[in-house]
Amino acid sequence: MNVSIRFALVLSLSALSLLLGELTVSKEEAGLRPVALSFSKTGDLFVLDAGGRVMVFPRSDQSGRPRVIATLSSSWQVSDLTVGGTDGEDHIFIIVTQGNLSQIMQYAVDGKFETSWFQIGPLSGVCTDRSAVYAASWSAGFVYRQPFSAPPKISPKPFYRFLNMRSIGSLAWDPVANVLFAADLQTGSVTALQIESMQSHAVADGLGQITALNYDSKGRILYVVDGAGRTVWSVNTAAKNPKPVIVAKSGQLRIPSAIAVADDGTLWIGDPEAHALFQFSKTGKNTN
């Protein structure tokens, strides 16, 4: 459903110098609470708001006003969003939960509802590969997989259980190595699953309260957001012995809960408590 909402987007031109670059804040004064971010293949930035709004910043004007393309029912609690698909056609996948029932909802990039799949039990993070959507369970360490071609309202099947994880909060996919990353919200650990061999190994631990993951396939970098620690970590997955490195840490962040990487390497960070989207340029250049 297309919804027209007036946004008062106030752009602050001040920036903080942080370690390896520059953080610029774009604040929305009318209640923006971004909980998930994802870029499409065409470079448009999609935002899921805690209030159930799905918004898009067109690539041609990502410093301007976002456009609301859909509004979800207030009876469902939103959890995560990702953009992905096959044959060059992108779709939006959203996790929503109501009590002990969850849905993976699929929308077109123009906001038109397409289909949904139901799952008993609360789901959390979501990501896609070339043929399916993956959704994580808050409990028991399960990850579910649903092919894009699955009929509507069919429950996704269990794909893998991370036995060492208590509460999977976020997922990310590496299209180069065909690896699925899962983050434990409680322990601050990240585990990688090689999908072809179905073998898993630890990537990092002790990274605080992980609220988001995102994978940069160009740089082979996994970005990890520690919401409680107001920190963004990077892990070079191409390295022989990868170690987490702090990329950004700022008092301007409150509880960052979303991250996405643009084609030029710019990081977009969503913070629902700060009511803001932050842009972090590793080159130190103002990205607006």
Image (cartoon, rainbow, N blue to C red):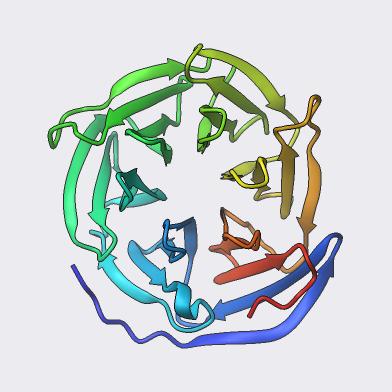
Relative to 15, residue 147 above or below: above
The residue located at (62%, 32%) in the rendering is 186
Instruction: Name the foreground residue: 288 vs 141.
Output: 288
Q: Where is residue 202 in the image (x, y as percent from the top left)?
A: 68, 21
Q: Position of residue 104 (x, y in %)?
A: 28, 41
Total numbered labels placed on residues in the image: 0
Q: Position of residue 127 (x, y in %)?
A: 43, 40
Relative to 151, residue 98 above or below: below
In this picture, residue 43 sits left or right of residue 27: left
Relative to 22, residue 79 above or below: above
In this picture, residue 20 sits left or right of residue 220: right
In this picture, residue 234 sits left or right of residue 116: right
Instruction: Name the foreground residue: 22 vs 220.
Output: 220
Asked whether the viewer can see residue 149, the reply is yes
The residue located at (28%, 30%) in the rendering is 146
The residue located at (65%, 59%) in the rendering is 265
Asked whether the viewer can see residue 31, the reply is no
Quarter of the image that includes the N terminus: bottom left
Q: Position of residue 175 (x, y in %)?
A: 51, 36
On the image, which quarter does residue 213 sit in? top right
Q: Farthest right residue?
A: 19
Q: Farthest front residue?
A: 87
The residue located at (73%, 46%) in the rendering is 233
Quarter of the image that includes the C terminus: bottom right
